[in-house]
Image (tube, rainbow, N blue to C red):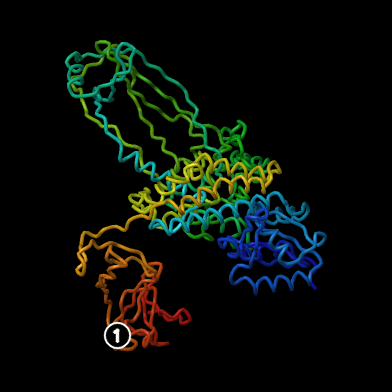
Amino acid sequence: MTKNLVIVESPAKSKTIEKYLGNGYKVVSSKGHIRDLATTGKYGLGVDVDNNFTPSYTFISGKKKLVNELKKQVKESDKIYLATDPDREGEAISWHLKEALNIKDKDYERVLFHEITHDKVIEAFQDPRKIDEDLVKSQETRRILDRIIGFRLSKLMQSKTGGKSAGRVQSVALKLIVDREREIEAFTPEEYWTITSIFPTFEAELFEYQKKKVEIHNETEADAILNKLTDTYRLENVEEKLKNKKSKPPFITSTLQQEASTKLGFPAKKTMSLAQKLYEGVDLDNETVGLITYMRTDSVRLSNEFVGSGKSFIEKNYGKEYIGYSKQAKNKENVQDAHEAIRPTSIYRTPESVKQYLTSDEYKLYRMIFYRALASIMADAKVNQTTVILNNQNYLFKTTGQVLIFDGYLKIYADYESNEDKVLPEFKEKEYVTNNVEKKQHFTLPPARYTEAKLIQEMEKLGIGRPSTYATIISNIRDRGYVTVEDKKFVPTDIGFEVTDKLQEFFSDIINVEYTADMENDLDKIASHDANYIQVLTNFYQKFDPILQKAFGEMERAKPKETGEVCPECGNPLVIRKGKYGEFTACSNYPECKYVKKEIKVVKEIMDCPICKQGKIIEKKTKKGKIFYGCNNYPKCKVATWDIPTGEICPECGNLLVEKNKKIKCSNSECRYEK
């Protein structure tokens, strides 16, 4: 009989934690959530909106067998430890486990791991608590809000537009992208000119005339200034300043996603997946250990323990002068300080020492996390900045330069920050001569489209969504076809414009930055017992439902897009419609005219099928558009593979040989043949 049963979310954690705890403990995984809102009742919401928004829960598909096994293990155990992730979602998973497995209050404890290391896991078991009901209600309220808005607005969009879905935060994120695109479209470039004097060892740009900033609007104005200038420039002033360059605070969820995007080229979804693996545990030589602390956090706080060991590490490896003595960076207002910043669990597990145990991408992310945390407690870099002013007929020209005189935190973080020296000559002469003066035309630029990093930064600044949800939000608007990515920037599609415009026509008071940010604040208040969840839901629904009913009645259905062709049967325009199996071309005069254009599919033949010797191996697509290769003699010949076939047959099992990772292998995963 098991005395102590520990339930975690992830199977990857369970083996590691069981090793730490030793005999007497069995560690099992719930594999994430086991229950979710049902799709029964009014509108299929799984929420009784007329009875205090009472939720109905059902087991997630495929989890029933797991739940029965967990129930059996609970009955055989004296004590249950619910050790799901240390955040709002994790708290809710623990509550669902307690309810679904019929665990009594006296029989369980809630433990939280902020890092998966031996000492911290043992420490967590010495300080258990009960489930935080307020955190659970906050998560439940968020889920109910998202279900109501998601189901009802998505149904509206599907019936009135070409869109597939809408969401509480998703639609606001899409609106940011659409609004930015309209700013770009409406932008009118303005002409301006610059004048630069070019000397043998430096350049100086015109910036001021008679104590006013110089603005040159056209070439005529530029020429007028050039005509007044002489070849001789008088040295007006040389100013040298010693400037401190401070390191950035350690990573939080949003800044990690942003930096991984800009510095490593990782999408937010990939970053969070890699960080999860680093948190849950990596197999080293003689132990399995989590390399970083919990990666869902908005606090920049570091533990005194880490700061102390970090400073010892800095002194030993770089010298005492590299230790930063300033106070740690402060959190912004409204930050939940339940977790530390993202940092290595041990300062002595350097990226180089664990590189052999990590994939290339895991190593890149861990290295950036490690050195960002360490750099945050290192001394400032010191830069000697020189500003030189030259006078020509009361037109002032400026040149600046800087020289790094102490690298400080840049000793370890220079790979992630640009800091190029610009060395100026010594200015001892009173006058400098040149006849090389350059005028240059410029035009103001429109605001830039959002990259993934910039969109995350904007969402965080505006307070919409939460860092842990950004990756999912971005994936949703891409997968729904609302945006495309060009040159790593988001561009809204026609459907993205249409859905945004239709929502703004009726729901501008709800689908906007301010309302969404206020709702996030309300959810935080529920978590801290400062707001009543039923009242929050009631206030929302009383505002939302009347607008929704009006929209269903009054919103005009979007007209199908015309193809430019005419119907051969009745002469009306042909349009693109959407059906169960995707888009098709049909007559706009439906249902009077039922003409549908037959599409000629271009089939890409790869080779003769070596298995049935009757069909052809062709390129096919799944319903989600993923390419695979199969025989056109299906279902008689059921050969299929994700990898490109070579046209040869495996000598060991008779299946196709394919090219995978520049090697010729058998397409049958159970066969180990490799050519």
Whether residue 347 appears in this view of the structure is yes
In the rendered image, the vertical position of residue 266 relative to residue 42, given as above or below: above
Q: Secondary structure at mark 1?
A: loop
Whether residue 284 appears in this view of the structure is no
Residue at figure coordinates x 35%, y 52% from the top left: 493
Within the image, what quadrant is residue 454 found in? top left
* Kind of residue sitting beneath label 1: Gly
> How many other residues sit within 10 Å of disc 1, few (<14), some (14-19) or many (≥20)?
some
Report the residue that reaches farthest toward the front: 592
Spot occupied by residue 642 in the image (x, y as percentages of width and height): 39, 73
Spot occupied by residue 112 in the image (x, y as percentages of width and height): 70, 54
In the rendered structure, the answer to whether residue 579 lies left or right of residue 114 reads: left
Along the viewing direction, whichever of 98 and 523 lies nearer the viewer = 523
Residue at figure coordinates x 42%, y 59% from the top left: 159
Instruction: Please count the marks in the image.
Output: 1
Question: Residue under circle 1?
Answer: 615
The quadrant of the image that shows the N terminus is: bottom right
Along the viewing direction, whichever of 302 and 548 lies nearer the viewer = 548
Spot occupied by residue 653 in the image (x, y as percentages of width and height): 42, 87
Spot occupied by residue 666 in the image (x, y as percentages of width and height): 40, 80
Residue at figure coordinates x 67%, y 55% from the top left: 51
Along the viewing direction, whichever of 159 and 398 lies nearer the viewer = 159
In the rendered image, the vertical position of residue 474 relative to residue 6, given as above or below: above
The quadrant of the image that shows the C terminus is: bottom left
In the rendered image, the vertical position of residue 636 relative to residue 599, given as above or below: below
